[in-house]
Amino acid sequence: DPEFGNPEWIWRNGSLIPWADARVHVNAVGHASVSAVFEGVKAYLSADGTRLLAFRLDDHLDRLARSARICRLDLPYTRERLRAAVLDLLRINGYAEDVYIRPWVFPSGVIREQMVPAGTRCDVVVDTWPFRSGLSGGDSCRATVSSWIRVGDASAPPRAKAFSNYHNGRLALIEARENGYDWPIMLNERFKVSEGPAACVAIVRDGTIITPSLTSGLLESITRDTVLALAAGMGIPVQEREVDRSELYLADEIFFMGTAWEILPVTSVDRLSVGAGRVGPIASLLRTEYDRLVRGRADHHGEWLTELPLPGGE
Ligand code: PMP
C-alpha cells in the first residue's frame, strides 16, 4: 500500500514474505510488547544515485543484540544473517530512494502475561519504509524541558532500545505538543539532561560541543557517536559530561542527534531563544558533513557504509 509507505515484502524469521501475509494472532499484541526491542536504521541514496548506502548497519545490529541481552530475549539470528536479511529486503522491495529500516524482536505466539520468561522464542521482523531526509533543508525545532523524568538505569534502562521505554518518551512528547513546543528534552533521575524521546542532545558553548555522557541515562546513540567523530575530524572540541538544565538556557547552539531526526537544530528552549534563535554554524556544518558522509561523498569512514548497488546503476 504505497500510500502508507508499505512495501511489497517484509522479512520475518528467516523468510521474505508478502506484506499482507505478515500476520500474528491478536493475543500476540500487547503482552509481548512489554519486552520487545528494536532498531532504527537508515539507508540513503548515494549522491550519484547508483547505490543505496545503509548507514552503520552493523553497529545498529550489534546494538539490537545488546538490547535483547539486557531485556533477556534470545535473538536467534547472527549479525551476518540479519545484515543479509536487510539487504535482501531492500533489494526485493526495489527501493531507489532513502529508506528507513526497522528490525524488531518480540516474544512469539499467544502470550497472556507481561512477565514473559527469559528464553521465550522470539519473532524477528525487518520492516522498511521510505522517508524524506531533513539534512539538506533548513529544519529546526522549538524544545521544552519536560516535567516527565527520563526512565533510568535503575528502573527501565534507556540503554536498551525497548519499545516500553517509549511510553515515557510519549508522555513527554504529548505534554510538549500540548504546551505548543515541537519536542521535549528530558532530565534524568539526577535532574541532569538526558535525551529527547527519540534522539540524543548536544549543546554548544564557546565553540565546544557538550553532550551528556553515556551514563546520563540515554541510548548509546549511533548518531551521537558519528557527530563526535565528525567534530573530531573538523577540529571542534567535544566534552562528554553531565549537562545541567540551566546550561540549555545559556547555550549558543543546541541540536538533537538521532537516526530518524538526523541532526536537528533547536532554536528555542522553554521560549528562550538559543543563541540568535536561528540554526547555528556548528549544527549547520555538522549537517552538511553528515549529509556528505551518509550519501557516500566523504573521504573518510567508508567502513560505515554498506553498499547495495541499484539495478543498472553500476
Ligand atoms: N535516544 C532515543 C530514546 C532514541 O530512540 C534514539 C533513536 N534510536 C536515539 C536516542 C538516537 O539513537 P541513534 O542515533 O542510534 O538513532
Image: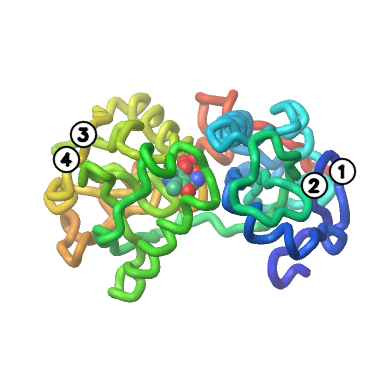
The tag earlier along the polypeptide, 2 or 4, is 2
Residue 189 percent location from the top left of the image: 26, 44
Q: Which residue is mark 3?
A: 208
Q: Nearer the viewer, residue 48 or 106?
A: 106
Q: Are marks 1 and 2 in contact (CB under 8 Å)?
A: yes
The tag earlier along the polypeptide, 2 or 3, is 2
Q: Is residue 135 visible?
A: no
Label 4 SS:
strand
Q: Are marks 4 and 3 in contact (CB under 8 Å)?
A: yes
> Distance between the Cα atoms at labels 2 and 4?
45 Å
> Distance between the Cα atoms at labels 1 and 3?
47 Å
Q: Nearer the viewer, residue 22 or 305?
A: 22
Amino acid identity at mark 4: Arg
Nearer to us of marks 2 and 3 is 2
Q: Which residue is mark 2?
A: 11
Please state, as top left, top right, bottom left or bottom right, where the C terminus lies in the image.
top right
Which mark is on residue 15? 1
Amino acid identity at mark 3: Thr
**Quarter of image, res 286:** top left
> Distance between the Cα atoms at labels 1 and 4?
50 Å
> Distance between the Cα atoms at labels 2 and 3?
43 Å
Which mark is on residue 256? none
Residue 195 percent location from the top left of the image: 34, 47
Nearer to us of marks 2 and 4 is 2
**Quarter of image, res 120:** top right
Binning the other alpha carbons within 10 Å of mark 3 as few (below 14), some (14 to 19) or many (20 upward) gives some
Which mark is on residue 205? 4
Q: Are marks 2 and 3 in contact (CB under 8 Å)?
A: no
